[in-house]
Image (cartoon, rainbow, N blue to C red):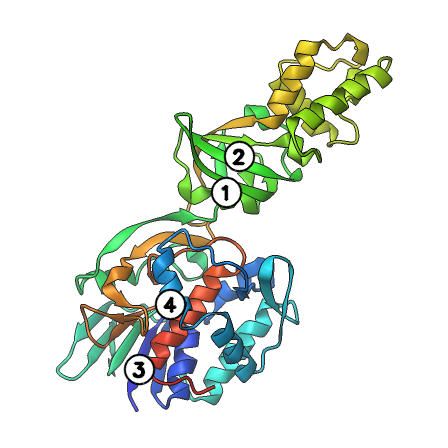
Amino acid sequence: METVVIIGGGAAGLAAAIAAAECGDRVTVLERMDRVGKKILATGNGRCNLMNTGMRRYPGSSAWADAVLDRCGVEAQTRFWQHLGLRMRQEDGGRVYPVSGMASSVLDTLRFAAAALQVEIVTGVQVTGLFKARHGWTVMAGENKWKADRVIVAGGGCAQPKLGSDGSTWPLMTALDHRLNAPKPALTQIVTETAPIRGLSGIRIRTAVKVTRAGADVYQEAGELLFADYGVTGVCSMQCARYVQPGDLFHIDLSRAFGFESPAALRQELHRRLSAWGERSQGELLTGLCVPKLADALFRAAGMKAGEHALCKRITEDQIERLVQCAADFMLEIRGVKGFESAQVTAGGLNVQDFDPATMASLLAPGVHAAGEMLDVDGDCGGYNLMFAFGSGILAGLNGRNCPW
C-alpha cells in the first residue's frame, strides 16, 4: 500500500484515484475548483461522450496515444465503467454515452465510487510546489503540504479555464526538467472574414471543408458546419482549428451541402431550372436547395444581385458557371481561432517522450506521473479526448499492477 496524492480532480484524476484506491493505496485528490469534475459536466453538450469504438483519431502524438490505449482502451474502460455500475450505449460514429444521456451520471459514478473507496477529496486547493523528499514527494499548497510515495499530476491543459484547466500545473513538471510543447487551442471556432457570410449566423449545413495555405492543401474534413457572426464553428470546422494560421483560406463545398455529389450535378440542375423556371424570379433559383440567406450569400460571391423583378431567363451561361464554381468552392480568409476560453481541448503539453505509456510514470522524476490533458495528446471530436483522459488516468493509478476489475 502506498500514499498517492493526485493533483487535479477531473476525468484523468478521478479515474486515477479510483484505480489506485482499488489496489489498496491511500489516495488524496487536490482540486483547485470548488468541486471536482466540472469539465466532465460540460462534455458532449452535457451528455458526456465517454469514448469512441471506431478508428482512433489523435492528431497530437498519435503513436504514443495508441501505446496508452492499447493497454487501456475501449475494452478495458468498458470493464471499468461496468465495475462502477455505469451503463452505456453506442451511437452513430462509435460515440459512447451513458444511457441516462446526462454527464452528471458519469460524474456521480466517479464521485460515489471514490467516496466508497475512502478517497479523500480536498477542493479549493492551488498546488504551488512539488518537491522530492527524502522518502517520496512533498506537495505544497500555500502553508499546507502533503507527503506521498507517488504523485499523479492531472491538472489539465488550458482549455476552458473557467472549468478548472488553466495550465497552472505545467510549471510543477517543467520544474522537474520536463519539456513543454507550446500549447494552443484545438477543437475551437475559426475566425474568418465576415463580409461573405453576412446574415448567415445560425445557419447549419452538412458539407466538406478544406484549409489551404499558399495554394497547398493543409487539412480537409467533412461533417456539420455552423455559420457564426465571427466565422465558422461546428464539428467539421473545429476539427480544422489546430491546423490553421491567419491568412489561410477556408473552403466550403456548398454544392455538397445542397445535396449534390459533384459540381457537375449542380450545374445540370441549375440548367434544368432555367429551362423550366424562365419566368420566375432569379431569387427563387436556389429554392429547395438552401435557405434564402445562404442563396443571397452565394449570389454575392458570384457577383450577382438577384433582383425581385429579374427573371431566371435573364441569367447567362457565365453567371451559371460562376454560381457553380462559388458553390463548389465558397472561400473565406482565416483571421485566426477563438482562444482557450472556447476551446474544447489543448494541443500541446508535456512532451510524451518523457513518460512511460504503460504507467504514465515520469522517466525524469521517479514516483511522479502525468495523465490526461497535461500531456501533448489531443484527439478529434467524438469522445477521443475523454477516452485518453480516463485511460491514462487508470494506468497511472494502477502503476503496472493487475487491473482489479
User: Distance between the Cα atoms at labels 4 and 1?
Assistant: 29 Å
Q: Secondary structure at mark 1?
A: loop
Number of residues whose C-alpha sits closer than 10 Å to that of mark 4, classed few (under 14), some (14–19) or many (20 or more) = many
The alpha-carbon separation of the residues under discs 2 and 3 comes to 46 Å
Quadrant assignment, res 17? bottom left
Cα separation between marks 3 and 4: 21 Å
Residue at 76%, 18% (x, y): give it: 271
Are the two marked residues, 2 and 1, in contact with CB atoms closer than 8 angstroms?
yes
Q: Is residue 16 left or right of residue 49?
A: left
Mark 1 touching mark 3, by CB under 8 A?
A: no
Give the CA distance from mark 1 to mark 3.
38 Å
For badge 3, the amino acid type reads Val
User: Which is more foreground, mark 2 or mark 3?
Assistant: 3
Residue type of the residue flagged with mark 4: Val
Asked where in the image residue 305 lies, by quadrant, the reply is: top right
Q: Residue at x 65, y 23 (%)?
A: 298
Label 2: how many Cα within 10 Å (few below 14, some 14–19, many 20+): some
Task: Say if mark 3 contacts mark 4, CB within 8 Å.
Answer: no
**Image coordinates for residue 115, horizontal then vertical, percent:** 47, 85
Circle on res. 4: 3
The residue tagged with tag 2: helix, strand or loop? loop
Label 2: which residue? 230
In this view, the mark in front (3 or 4): 4
Q: Please state which amino acid type lies under the numbered disc 1.
A: Gln
- Residue 293 lies left or right of residue 181; in this view the side is right
| Residue at 44% from the left image edge and 70% from the top image edge | 390
Specify the farthest residue to the left.
134
Q: Which residue in the protein does label 4 denote?
A: 68
Q: Is residue 309 visible?
A: no
